[in-house]
Amino acid sequence: MTENIFAVVAELIPSNITVHEGQSRLSTPPVLTDYPHVTVWGTLPNDQSENLADQPSRFQATIRLTYAATSGSSLFWIVTRVREALEGAQPQIDGYYIERLKPRSLMPLQRDAEVTLQGGLNPLFAIDETPLIAQRA
């Protein structure tokens, strides 16, 4: 499996949403225009094949989605749109059948005390996760 699974999931998110893969890429120092955004990250695929052949037939990864925004309404806006796009979606990876995605809340809305924006504002964030389960087609 050579696909970037984070990119495969990121492609399903509407184009009017800023998406980062792997880690957030903020300005130095972070500015208001860095928000809102979603970062697609998670665990790398684990081979779960149960065959004696040297060909992986099944893998699983956990996709995490970190939503970040400067207000509660902005955070809810991005969470709603990303969840609508991903709920029941099936990413495409050549040679694999991917089970439907089911994003669920992993971490509720919190203030990000590690980032301070102009005016002393700390952005908000929340995290969803969904399993990405693939079976060789």
Image (cartoon, rainbow, N blue to C red):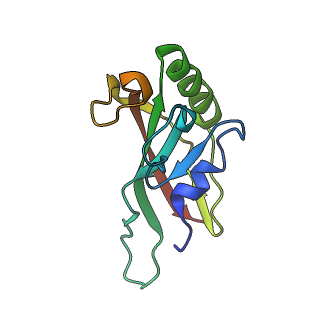
Name the quadrant containing residue 123: top left
Foreground pick, 42 / 30: 30
What x and y, as percent, mark residue 36? 55, 31
Q: Residue furthest left?
A: 113
**Measuring 58% from the left and 23% from the top, which residue is drawn there?**
80
Q: Quadrant of the C terminus?
A: bottom right
Name the quadrant containing residue 46: bottom left
Q: Is residue 85 above or below residue 54?
A: above
Left or right of 94 on screen, residue 113: left
**Measuring 40% from the left and 29% from the top, which residue is drawn there?**
125
What x and y, as percent, mark residue 56? 45, 75
Left or right of 124 on screen, residue 2: right
Name the quadrant containing residue 66: top left
What x and y, as percent, mark residue 59? 43, 63
Foreground pick, 29 / 77: 29
What x and y, as percent, mark residue 116? 35, 32
Left or right of 51 on screen, residue 103: right
Count the numbered circles shown: 0
Query: Would you say residue 93 is visible in this rendering?
Result: yes
**Measuring 72% from the left and 41% from the top, which residue is drawn there?**
15
Q: Is residue 39 above or below residue 102?
A: below
Q: Residue furthest top?
A: 73
Foreground pick, 117 / 131: 117
Q: Residue furthest front?
A: 119
Q: Residue furthest bottom?
A: 54
Q: Is residue 33 above or below residue 131?
A: above
Query: Would you say residue 121 is visible in this rendering?
Result: no
**Measuring 54% from the left and 41% from the top, which residue is drawn there?**
101
